[in-house]
Image: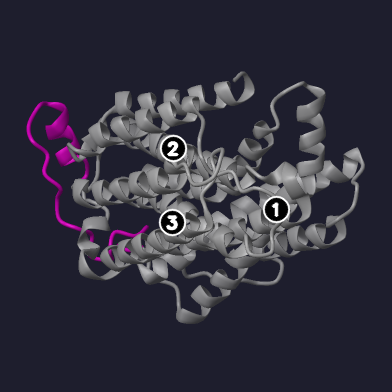
Amino acid sequence: MSTATRRFPLTDWTVVVPVVALLALVFSWGRDLPGFAVGLVALCLGGAVLAAVHHAEVVAHRVGEPFGSLVLAVAVTIIEVALIVTLMADGGDKTASLARDTVFAAVMITCNGIVGLSLLVGALRNRVAVFNAEGSGAALATVATLAVLSLVLPTFTTSKPGPEFSTAQLAFAAVASLALYGLFIAVQTVRHRDYFLPVDTGAGAPAASAASGVSAAPGPKKADGGDGDGKHAAPPTARAALVSLGLLLAALIAVVGDAKAVSPTIEAAVAGAGLPNAVVGVIIALLVLAPETLAAVRAARRDRVQTSLNLGYGSAIASIGLTIPAIALASVWLSGPLLLGLGPVHMVLLALTVVVSALTIAPGRATLLQGGVHLVVLAAYLFLAVSP
C-alpha cells in the first residue's frame, strides 16, 4: 500500500519517532547532558528528520504542488525563527549576530546545497535536469532582493555605527520583507501557479533532446499537479493528511528543539577545537534544514526537480522574509546590538551565489556541471566558516 494512502497505527515508526523525539526534547530542555544522553538525543533528531520528510510527502501528495513544498518550508522556518528569538533573548550581547549568521547560513545551504544536490541527482537520473525557468527565476530574484536589503545594506548605512540598522531602517526592512514574501506566495500559489509545477520530462525525452543540443522546452505538467506518485496511487484522505500535518509539526518541533539541546555540546566541541563561534550557527542550520534537504533530494530522484527548487528557494525566502520581521518585533524588548550586515567575504560569496544561480536557472535545464558548481560554492562557504 502507498505511504500516501496508508493508515497510521500507533506502532508505526512514523508515529512513534516524533513522539519519542518530543519526549527527548522535554527531558533534555535546559539541562546539561552527559555524553550518552547527547548521543540519544542526536539519534532522536535523526529519526525526527526522516519522519518529517515522510509526513511532508503525505501532505504534499494531498494538496499538490506548489503547496506541498510550501508547507514544509514555512513550517520549518516558523519554528526556526522561534528558536532564534529564544536564543537571542537568553544570550545577550554574545548572540548579537545570531540572526545574521543563521539566515545567511540558511541562504547558502538552500541556494547552493539543496539546489546543487537536487540538480546533481536530477542530472544523474536523466542526464539533464529540467525545470521551469520562469518560476525558479522569480524565486531567485526574490531571494537576492531580500538578502541584499536585509544582510548587505546594514554594512553600508551610516545612521548607526557598525553593521546595524537604525530603528526606522529595521522597520522598513521588516515591512519590505513581509511584503515581498506575501507577494511571492500569492504568485506561487494563485496567479502563476503553473510556473512552479514540476515539468513532465516524458520519460526523459526533453532531457535527452537537451543533451543532444536540441532545445528542451518544458513539457506538459503532471495531471496531479506534479506531486509525487499521484499517477500511481490515489491521494491520501483528508483525515490522513491532517494526521500527517500534525505529526509533521511535531517532528519539526523535535528537530529544532533537539538541535538546541545538543548545541551546548556542539559549542564546547567547536571551542575546544579552536574554531570560530560562527561554526555553531552553520551546524545548527544544517541540522534544522535536514528535512528540506532530504525531501528535495527524494523529489529530484523522482524526476521532480522543480519541486526540489521550490523547496530550496522557498526556504531561503521564508528564512529571510519571516526572520527579519520577527527580529524587528523582538528588538523592542531584546537588549544589546543587532548585527545584520555581512562582512566582505560573505558578501563576495553571496554575489557569487546569485550570479551562478542566475546562469543555472536561465536555460531551464542543468547538467552535472551546474550541480557541482553550486556544491563547490557551498564547500567554500563551509571551509571559510572553519578557516576565515
213 lies above or below 341: above
Q: Which residue is mark 2?
A: 156
Q: CA distance from mark 3 to mark 1?
A: 19 Å
What residue sits 79% from the left and 58% below the top? 25
Q: Is residue 377 magenta?
A: no
Q: Which residue is mark 1?
A: 88
Q: Nearer the viewer, mark 1 or mark 2?
A: 2
Q: Nearer the viewer, residue 20 or 319?
A: 319
Q: Which residue is mark 3?
A: 173
Q: Nearer the viewer, residue 32 or 25?
A: 32
Disc nearer the start of the sequence (1/2) = 1
Q: Secondary structure at mark 2?
A: helix
What residue sits 24% from the left and 32% below the top? 359
What residue sits 56% from the left and 38% below the top? 162
Q: Quadrant of residue 121?
A: top left
Q: Residue furthest front?
A: 159
